Amino acid sequence: MATNTGKNHREGSVKDRTQTQTGSDAWVKRDAETGEFMDVKEDGKPFKGVAKEKDDRRS
């Protein structure tokens, strides 16, 4: 897991989590092991420190 430094930033990335963008520009966080959706962020900005999934549809 990423660790908080106490200096207003995080060291490393969040492990075992990925995120993908939906068609409505919301970002969805997913558990990498189970594939279960965990959280949705609808402000158009991605989650901080979470790896983005590769989207094969956009190539």
Image (cartoon, rainbow, N blue to C red):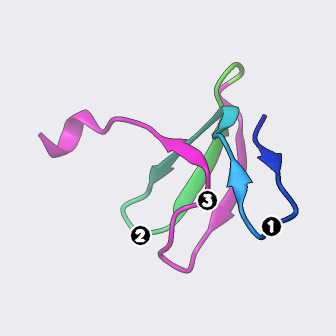
Q: Which residue is mark 3?
A: 48
The type of residue carrying mark 2 is Asp
Q: Is residue 57 left or right of residue 50?
A: left
Closer mark to the observer between disc 3 and disc 2: 3
56 drawn magenta: yes
| CB-based contact (under 8 Å), mark 2 and mark 1 | no
Q: Earlier in the sequence, mark 3 or mark 2?
A: 2
**Disc 1 packing (10 Å; few <14; some 14–19; many ≥20):** few
Q: Which mark is residue 31?
A: none
Q: Quadrant of the N terminus?
A: top right
The type of residue carrying mark 1 is Lys
The type of residue carrying mark 3 is Lys
Distance from Cα at disc 2 to Cα at disc 1: 30 Å
Task: Provide the residue span drawn in magenta.
Answer: 35-59
**Disc 3 packing (10 Å; few <14; some 14–19; many ≥20):** few
> In x, y percent, where is residue 9?
72, 63
Q: Earlier in the sequence, mark 2 or mark 1?
A: 1
Specify the quadrant of the image occupied by residue 12: top right
Q: Which residue is mark 2?
A: 25
31 drawn magenta: no
Pick whichever, 7 or 43, lies toward us.
7
> In x, y percent, where is residue 54?
34, 35
Against 53, residue 48 (above or below) is: below
Q: Which mark is residue 7?
A: 1
Closer mark to the observer between disc 2 and disc 1: 1
